[in-house]
C-alpha cells in the first residue's frame, strides 16, 4: 500500500512539475521568442526603408494636404512585414510590426493583416489581428481602447493616423462581416478608408472576438516628422 501511495505521490509531483513548465513556456518563453521576432521584423523594415527600397503608398485625396505617389505600391507578401503600428493608448514605447496573412506562423511574429482586405491607407477596410495573450501579448490592453484613440501606422514613406469610432465590440469568430469593406455593425454607412482591429476574448480563451473600428483621419510624409498623435 505504501508503495502504491508513494508511486501515486511521485506521479502527481511529476505531473504538477510538467504543468508548471508548460505554463512557464506559454507565459514566458513564447513571449521572449515573439518579442525577439517582432524586434527583428522592425529592424528589417528600418534597414529596408533606409535603403529607399519601399515604394510610396497611393495618394489619399481629401485626407491629407501632401502626399506623393511613386509608381504602383509594392505588393504584400505572405509572412513579410510591411508596416509598423503604434497605439499611444498602450504606451509610447508600444510598437509592433504588421505582416501579411493571419496564419499561426505570422501571428507569432507580430500583427497580422487579413489577406484580401484593403491596403494600408486605401479605400476599403484595412483589417489587422493580434494575440491578446501569448506570443508577446501584443493586444493585451485591447479592452482599454476608446473612441477617439489614435492608431498610427507607417510604411516607411507615409504616416497614417486612424481614429477609433467604435469599440471594443464583442462578437463571435464566425462574424466575418466585421472585416467587410464597409464593416457590419460598425455604424459606417458608405465606403471609406477604414481600419479594423481584432483579438480574442476572453483573455485566455478564443470563444469570442473583440473588435474596434476606425477611420483614416490624416496622413503625412515621414520626412515631415512624427504625427501629432505620437508626440508626447
Image (cartoon, rainbow, N blue to C red):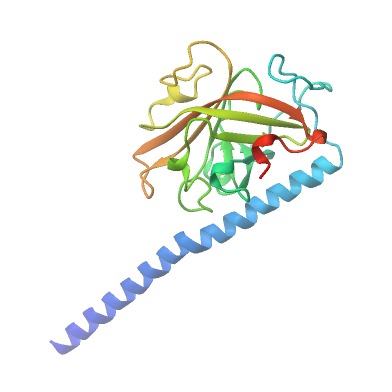
146, above or below 105, in the image: above
181, above or below 14, in the image: above
Which residue: 48% across, 20% down? Answer: 183
Which residue: 65% across, 27% down? Answer: 120
Which residue occupies the extreme front position in the image?
232
- Closer to us: 159 or 49: 159
Q: How many marks?
A: 0
9, above or below 35, in the image: below
Residue 137: % across, % down:
50, 51
User: Position of 136 compared to 70: left or right?
Assistant: left
- Closer to us: 25 or 152: 152
Which residue: 66% across, 21% down? Answer: 122
Which residue occupies the extreme bottom position in the image?
2
Which residue: 66% across, 45% down? Answer: 232
Residue 13: % across, % down:
30, 77
User: Position of 46 compared to 5: left or right?
Assistant: right
**Quarter of the figure that contains the N terminus:** bottom left
Which residue occupies the extreme left position in the image?
1
Residue 55: % across, % down:
80, 29
Which residue occupies the extreme top position in the image?
190
Residue 171: % across, % down:
36, 31
Amino acid at each position: 500500500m505504501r508503495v502504491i501511495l508513494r508511486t501515486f505521490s511521485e506521479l502527481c509531483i511529476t505531473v504538477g512539475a510538467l504543468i508548471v513548465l508548460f505554463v512557464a513556456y506559454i507565459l514566458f518563453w513564447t513571449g521572449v521568442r515573439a518579442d525577439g521576432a517582432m524586434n527583428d521584423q522592425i529592424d528589417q523594415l528600418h534597414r529596408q526603408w533606409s535603403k529607399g527600397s519601399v515604394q510610396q503608398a497611393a495618394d489619399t485625396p481629401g485626407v491629407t494636404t501632401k502626399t506623393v505617389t511613386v509608381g504602383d505600391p509594392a505588393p504584400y507578401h505572405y509572412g513579410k512585414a510591411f508596416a509598423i503600428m503604434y497605439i499611444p493608448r498602450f504606451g509610447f514605447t508600444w510598437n509592433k510590426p504588421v505582416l501579411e496573412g493571419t496564419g499561426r506562423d505570422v501571428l507569432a511574429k507580430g500583427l497580422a493583416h487579413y489577406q484580401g482586405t484593403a491596403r494600408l491607407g486605401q479605400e476599403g477596410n484595412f483589417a489587422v489581428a493580434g494575440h491578446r495573450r501569448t506570443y508577446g501579448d501584443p493586444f493585451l490592453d485591447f479592452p482599454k481602447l476608446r473612441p477617439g484613440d489614435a492608431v498610427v501606422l507607417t510604411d516607411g514613406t507615409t504616416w497614417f493616423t486612424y481614429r477609433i469610432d467604435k469599440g471594443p465590440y464583442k462578437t463571435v469568430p464566425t462574424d466575418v462581416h466585421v472585416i467587410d469593406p464597409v464593416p457590419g455593425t460598425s455604424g459606417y454607412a458608405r465606403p471609406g478608408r477604414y481600419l479594423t482591429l481584432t483579438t480574442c476574448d476572453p483573455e485566455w480563451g478564443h470563444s469570442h472576438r473583440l473588435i474596434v473600428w476606425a477611420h483614416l483621419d490624416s496622413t503625412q510624409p515621414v520626412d515631415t516628422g512624427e504625427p501629432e498623435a505620437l508626440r508626447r
